[in-house]
């Protein structure tokens, strides 16, 4: 059966108190007995001296010449006088142990006194008989022992005192045990409650309920232990949360690695396919030039097609390498405060010649706005978007470049008047090597990497891009947070 720690501690304290009281009582009572014995031994010794002095004084004041004869002759009167003086029962004996004087006649004889022999041989001796002490001491003349005197001392008073003290110890002991029990119950109730609170806290920690752990309002070691358990539970909670976070991160990393592995396989497959097509065309044109090297028109035409495919391969390689670097390395961007209107006007001037070649008109509606961005990346983003607007537009079409501020963002739209992008292709246009129309891409040297590159660069610039659905042609909306002086680079 399980016993409460409060009961165990209370019993232990009571047993310890009983043990201490027993030890104290034992030695105290022994000390009292010893003190009483020493006290009546000293009293009787002093009385024996007094008796000897009194006998000598009586002898000196008498006419007797022989002390021995005086002692035997006057024993009765000496006993009476000393009995009155000392208030004790006194008996005188001669050197043969014969009684020669007594106040009482029933004091016994030498047969009852086993210690008489020692007294006759000049020793002070006594024996205890119940509550009476029989004390024998030598009687001296001026030179030698002439007899023995006997005192009878009753120890009832000392015995009563001893019993009173013993009773007092018993009563005080019982009272101390009762009071100690009550105090121990009261004190240990609080201690045990604290321990039970610790036990509950540990159980809550075992179950993972860290919120239920409380700090005890104590100013002692219990309070320190309580705070230690509380902070330990919080630390465990933080560690578990951190482990879960790291676990989630690891899971995401694994999923991302799996996704990257899948993308890598697709990327390798796509790039292999994309490179194979122009290389096949170039090889075919070289073969034609070898077969018809005397036909200048054929050679010129094949050369033109090969150069166009080589240019397409070169563009594909350049974009692929740049996209690969973006995937693998975290390049430091040189962010700075730039005026997007100024940069867009510069891009439009650069792309104006190519647009004019296809009869494309570029219409600008630009609002001044400042953003924190890497200027080179910004240029590459919009050159790609405007270049797509030129390549996939109709002859004599238009490209609208708009820049405005909305919801604390600089929104930039690049809209063309081409045939647009079908709905079924819109979700995949930012994937590498994805093209809406393979034939059209080959016609205009499209690689399917431009929009993927744009998307990657925007993510690094904290920008966003989306394809607007409410336009007839193709319209991309790009947005950047407006520059704030409090934002650090």
Image (spheres, rainbow, N blue to C red):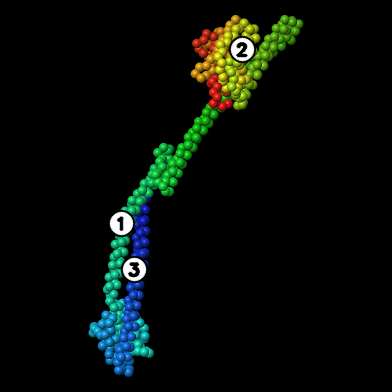
Q: Is residue 173 above or below residue 318?
A: below
Could you give the CA–CA distance between mark 3 and mark 1, rounded to whole angstroms? 23 Å
Q: Is residue 136 above or below residue 276?
A: below
Count of labels shown?
3
Give the left or right position of residue 386, taking residue 24 as reference: right
Q: Give the residue pinned by disc 1.
A: 178
Q: Earlier in the sequence, mark 2 or mark 3?
A: 3
Crowd band around label 1 with a 10 angstrom C-alpha radius: few (<14), some (14–19), many (20+): few
Give the left or right position of residue 47, taking residue 198 as reference: left
Q: Position of residue 203 (x, y in %)?
A: 40, 42
Q: Give the residue pinned by disc 3.
A: 29
Q: Residue at point 34% right, 57% down?
A: 14
Q: Residue at point 63% right, 12% down?
A: 349
Judge depth for marks 2 and 3 and give the one in front: 2
Query: Quick check: marks 2 and 1 in contact, CB under 8 Å?
Result: no
Could you give the CA–CA distance between mark 2 and mark 3, rounded to whole angstroms? 118 Å
């Amino acid at each position: 059966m399980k016993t409460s720690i409060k009961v165990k501690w209370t019993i232990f304290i009571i047993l310890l108190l009983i043990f201490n009281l027993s030890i104290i009582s034992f030695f105290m009572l022994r000390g009292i007995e010893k003190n009483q014995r020493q006290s009546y031994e000293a009293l009787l010794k002093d009385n024996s001296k007094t008796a000897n002095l009194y006998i000598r004084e009586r002898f000196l004041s008498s006419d007797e010449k022989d002390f021995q004869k005086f002692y035997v002759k006057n024993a009765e009167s000496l006993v009476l006088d000393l009995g009155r003086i000392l208030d004790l029962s006194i008996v005188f004996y001669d050197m043969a142990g014969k009684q020669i004087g007594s106040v009482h006649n029933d004091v016994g004889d030498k047969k009852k006194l086993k210690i008489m022999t020692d007294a006759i041989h000049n020793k002070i001796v006594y024996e205890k008989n119940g509550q009476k002490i029989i004390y024998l001491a030598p009687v001296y003349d001026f030179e030698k022992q002439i007899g023995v005197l006997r005192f009878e001392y009753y120890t009832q008073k000392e015995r009563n005192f001893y019993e009173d003290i013993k009773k007092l110890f018993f009563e005080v002991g019982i009272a101390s045990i009762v009071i100690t029990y009550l105090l121990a119950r009261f004190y240990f109730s609080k201690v045990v409650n604290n321990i039970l609170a610790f036990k509950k806290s540990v159980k809550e920690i075992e179950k993972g309920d860290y919120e239920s752990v409380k700090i005890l309002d104590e100013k002692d070691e219990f309070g320190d232990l309580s705070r230690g358990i509380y902070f330990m539970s919080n630390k465990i909670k933080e560690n578990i949360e951190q482990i879960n976070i790291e676990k989630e991160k690891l899971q995401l990393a694994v999923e991302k690695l799996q996704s990257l592995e899948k993308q890598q396989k697709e990327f390798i497959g796509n790039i292999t396919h994309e490179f194979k097509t122009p290389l096949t065309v170039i090889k075919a044109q070289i073969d034609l030039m070898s077969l018809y090297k005397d036909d200048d028109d054929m050679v010129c035409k094949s050369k033109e097609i090969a150069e166009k495919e080589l240019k397409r391969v070169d563009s594909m390689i350049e974009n692929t390498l740049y996209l690969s670097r973006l995937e693998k390395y975290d390049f430091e961007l040189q962010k700075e405060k730039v005026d997007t209107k100024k940069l867009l006007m510069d891009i439009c001037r650069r792309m104006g010649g190519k647009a004019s070649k296809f009869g494309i008109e570029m219409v600008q509606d630009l609002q001044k706005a400042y953003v924190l961005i890497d200027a080179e990346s910004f240029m590459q983003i919009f050159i790609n978007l405007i270049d797509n607007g030129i390549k996939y537009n109709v002859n004599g079409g238009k490209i609208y470049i708009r820049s405005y501020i909305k919801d604390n963002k600089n929104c930039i739209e690049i809209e063309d008047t081409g045939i647009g992008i079908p709905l079924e292709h819109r979700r995949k246009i930012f994937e590498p090597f994805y093209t809406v129309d393979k034939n059209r891409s080959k016609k205009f040297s499209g690689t399917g990497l431009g929009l993927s590159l744009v998307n990657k660069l925007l993510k690094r610039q904290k920008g966003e891009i989306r394809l607007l659905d409410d336009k007839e042609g193709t319209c991309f909306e790009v947005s950047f947070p407006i520059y704030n002086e409090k934002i650090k680079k």
